[in-house]
Amino acid sequence: ADEGSAVSIVVSEGPATAEVPDVVDALAQDAREQLEDAGFEVNAVEVFSDRPQGQVVAQSPRGGNQAEEGSTVRINVSKGTGLVEVPDFVGQSQEDAREQLANLGLGVNAVEVPSSAPAGVVVAQNPRGGTTVRVGGTVRLNVSAGG
């Protein structure tokens, strides 16, 4: 530029920001819509919680804070307590017990034991029927080797 000529300077105000909606306690789909409508991406992560399944239990950044438009907001969505009640399998076949445990999200540790019960029948278990356990746990089945 020539000496003494006018020069225009443009100063950035930084990235555009927006207020993050508070979506804690909302249902996951409603929370996603609110956040996306406000200009944010959503990262939904399922977590165990005492709150009802599908409800948002936490978010980051928190509602009411300013965040860069287009940035990602993480929401933690309840997938329930993760607890199930173990049925009483004593007297049932090992196959039936295995199927029911798999449907509950529980593993099986089957051990053959001497017993006068017919072969393949559950004669004892640990934990006992009626006990509450976390999904992903294992139930030991003592299965009759036959008499």
Image (cartoon, rainbow, N blue to C red):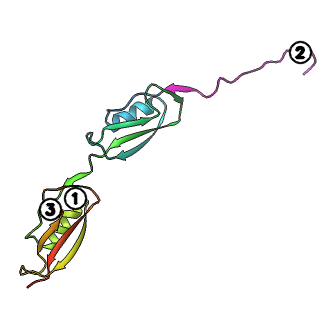
Residue displayed at 12% across by 66% down? 89
Of labels 3 and 2, earlier in sequence is 2
Q: Is residue 82 above or below residue 143?
A: above
Instruction: State which mark lies toward you, 1 or 2.
Output: 1
Q: Nearer the viewer, residue 115 or 55?
A: 115
Residue under circle 1? 104
Residue type pointed to by label 3 = Arg
Image quarter of residue 52: top left
Q: Nearer the viewer, residue 91 or 1?
A: 91
Disc 1 to disc 3, how far (Cα)?
A: 15 Å
Q: SS of the residue at dot 1?
A: loop
Q: Is residue 3 above or below residue 43?
A: above
Q: Position of residue 104 (x, y in %)?
A: 22, 58
Q: Position of residue 62 (x, y in %)?
A: 44, 31
Q: Are marks 3 and 2 in contact (CB under 8 Å)?
A: no
Residue type pointed to by label 2 = Ser
Q: Local crowd at mark 1 within 10 Å, few (<14), some, or many (≥20)?
A: some
